[in-house]
Each structure stands twice: as C-alpha cells, then as structure tokens.
Amino acid sequence: MNKNLLNIETIKKYVEKRKIDWTVHCLNRLNQRNISIIDVKNAINTGRIIEYYYDDYPYPSCLILGKSRKGKLIHIVCGISNELVHMITAYYPDIDKWERDMEKRRKSDGVL
C-alpha cells in the first residue's frame, strides 16, 4: 500500500465516486451516535486529517476532523486501500478527551 494514498484529497475523491466500504461496525456506531452518512460525507468534504495511523492493519488509516451539515464537529476514522475508503468509525469528540479545538488529545494526568 502506498502511504501517499493516505491524504484528504484522495479520500474526498473516493467518497465523491462512492468508492466506500461502510463496515458493519461503522454503521452500528453511526446509528448509536445519531450520525448520518450524509454528515460523515460532509465532514470529510469539509475536513482535514489530524492524525495518521500508517501501521494500522489491514490498511493505513487516519483521523479526520470535519463538520456535519449543521456545523457540529465530527471525528472520522477511515482506512484506505488502492480501491476504497474503509469507514471504521465516526463520533462527536468529547471535550474531556480533546483540547478545545478538537484537534489535539488532552494530556492524561495518569489517573484512571
């Protein structure tokens, strides 16, 4: 797999062409979290990659920060192969776990 595929422009192009693998896990999570497929697509189109996971298996993946149609911030985790974007999960980021900009993880204080 070419790591150069893991960029927001390629992901947007695959989404636009409907080259998307919606995993059962992802669809279940979207349903549980009341996130629509349209909002996931909108978040990708308005978003940018904030973390890369090149060593993920079976495909390198990334975390995208984007916005729903109503402007609510969404995180999307997706992988990419030579043919498809593999949607893994999507969620509304939690202020307890993320900095205000929802781009950087909060530092853990070590207390569980």
Image (cartoon, rainbow, N blue to C red):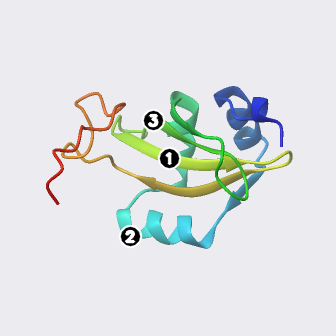
Q: Secondary structure at mark 2?
A: helix
Foreground mark, 2 or 3, reads 3
Query: Could you tell me if the residues under marks 2 and 3 are in contact, i.e. CB atoms within 8 Å?
Result: no
Q: Secondary structure at mark 3?
A: strand
Q: Quadrant of the N terminus?
A: top right
Residue 39 circle label: none
The disc labelled 1 sits on which kind of residue? Ile
Alpha-carbon distance for marks 2 and 3? 19 Å
Where residue 45 appears, as percent x and y from the top left, is 58, 32
Where residue 53 appears, as percent x and y from the top left, is 59, 43
Alpha-carbon distance for marks 2 and 1? 15 Å
Instruction: For label 1, count other residues whose C-alpha is less than 10 Å away and answer few (under 14), some (14-19) or many (20+).
Output: many
Q: Quadrant of the C terminus?
A: bottom left
Instruction: For label 2, count other residues whose C-alpha is less than 10 Å away and answer few (under 14), some (14-19) or many (20+).
Output: few
Alpha-carbon distance for marks 1 and 3? 7 Å
Image-quadrant location for residue 11: top right
Query: Could you tell me if the residues under marks 1 and 3 are in contact, i.e. CB atoms within 8 Å?
Result: no
Residue 32 circle label: 2
Where residue 100 appears, as percent x and y from the top left, is 22, 30
Rendered residue at 58%/58% (across/down):
88
Q: Is 22 on the left-hand or right-hand side of 33?
A: right
Q: Which of marks 1 and 2 precedes in the sequence?
A: 2
For label 1, the residue is 76
The disc labelled 2 sits on which kind of residue? Gln
Residue 65 circle label: 3
The disc labelled 3 sits on which kind of residue? Leu
The one nearer the camera, 85 or 68, is: 85
Instruction: For label 3, count other residues whose C-alpha is less than 10 Å away and answer few (under 14), some (14-19) or many (20+).
Output: many
